[in-house]
Image (cartoon, rainbow, N blue to C red):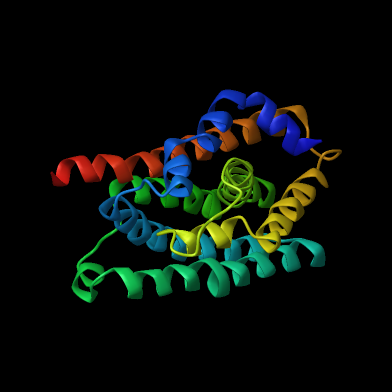
Amino acid sequence: MLFKKLVSFNKKVWSAYLTHRFAEKIFAGQLSNSEFKYYLIQDYFYLLEYGRAFLALGYKSKTHKEMVFAIENSKGIIYGEAKMHEQLLNNDIKEHEIKHAIPSLTTNAYTNYFNNLVIKGEFIDLLVALAACTIGYGTLAQLMKKKYPVISEDHPFKAWIDEYSSTDFEKITEEYIQFINSYSKTISLSKLKDLNKIFGDVCRLEIAFFNQCFEHSRTEK
């Protein structure tokens, strides 16, 4: 299966992403307010570009199935993840902090990476580039859920945890994996090499995205 090949080729970086201390700290409730606040703002900027990229994926589609997949995922981001982020931002962050915030260099590096594929890549290239976020979050949330099966009502990050560890998001994750796997028999060895690099790159960008939350917190002190 194609997704299994992508993970196998990028085993170390995929594992480092799924076991990143950010996920551990957020489930354990040990992330500081400043770290979570910075993450929320940057992730909101990211999700706006991420949602647009799925719309572009729809434009690149050649079949009805591809178009539906792209549009349904963009709707999930707009009405699901982005909406949840907006609610958390409104609850936890002052208006002037949001107004004066800008995407970081790390956030821009990530969004520029897949936006470059919007321009130059094929459907499958962009599909794989966008996979690390959705599949990665769904997978790490399920891993952490086994370690932290009970999340109290007063947990500071309950809304975030509930979103990504939900059965709905687990279903989205599985459907994404199955959709990638549907291309398993049509991918040449040269294209697989390209996709392995793309998947490894976006996993590293996910790690850098998590890292920036801690780096920003240190520079504030």
Q: Nearer the viewer, residue 143 or 219?
A: 143
Image quadrant holding the C terminus, namely top left
Q: Nearer the viewer, residue 162 or 197?
A: 162
The image shows residue 209, relative to residue 101, as above or below, that is above
Percent position of residue 58, x then y? 66, 65
Percent position of residue 131, x then y? 62, 48
**Residue at the right extreme of this rendering:** 185
Image quadrant holding the N terminus, namely top right
Q: How many labels does the image show?
A: 0
Percent position of residue 126, x then y? 61, 50
**Residue at the left extreme of this rendering:** 221
Q: Nearer the viewer, residue 53 or 19?
A: 19
Q: Quadrant of residue 184?
A: top right
Residue 63 in sight in this render? no
Which residue sits at x=56%, y=75%?
79
Q: Which of 153 and 77 is in front in this view?
A: 153
Which residue sits at x=53%, y=56%?
151
The image shows residue 202, relative to residue 69, as above or below, that is above
Which residue sits at x=56%, y=61%?
162
Residue 28 in sight in this render? yes
Q: Is residue 221 left or right of residue 81?
A: left
Q: Is residue 186 left or right of residue 212?
A: right
Percent position of residue 168, x then y? 69, 63
Which residue sits at x=67%, y=52%?
123
The image shows residue 130, relative to residue 47, as above or below, that is above
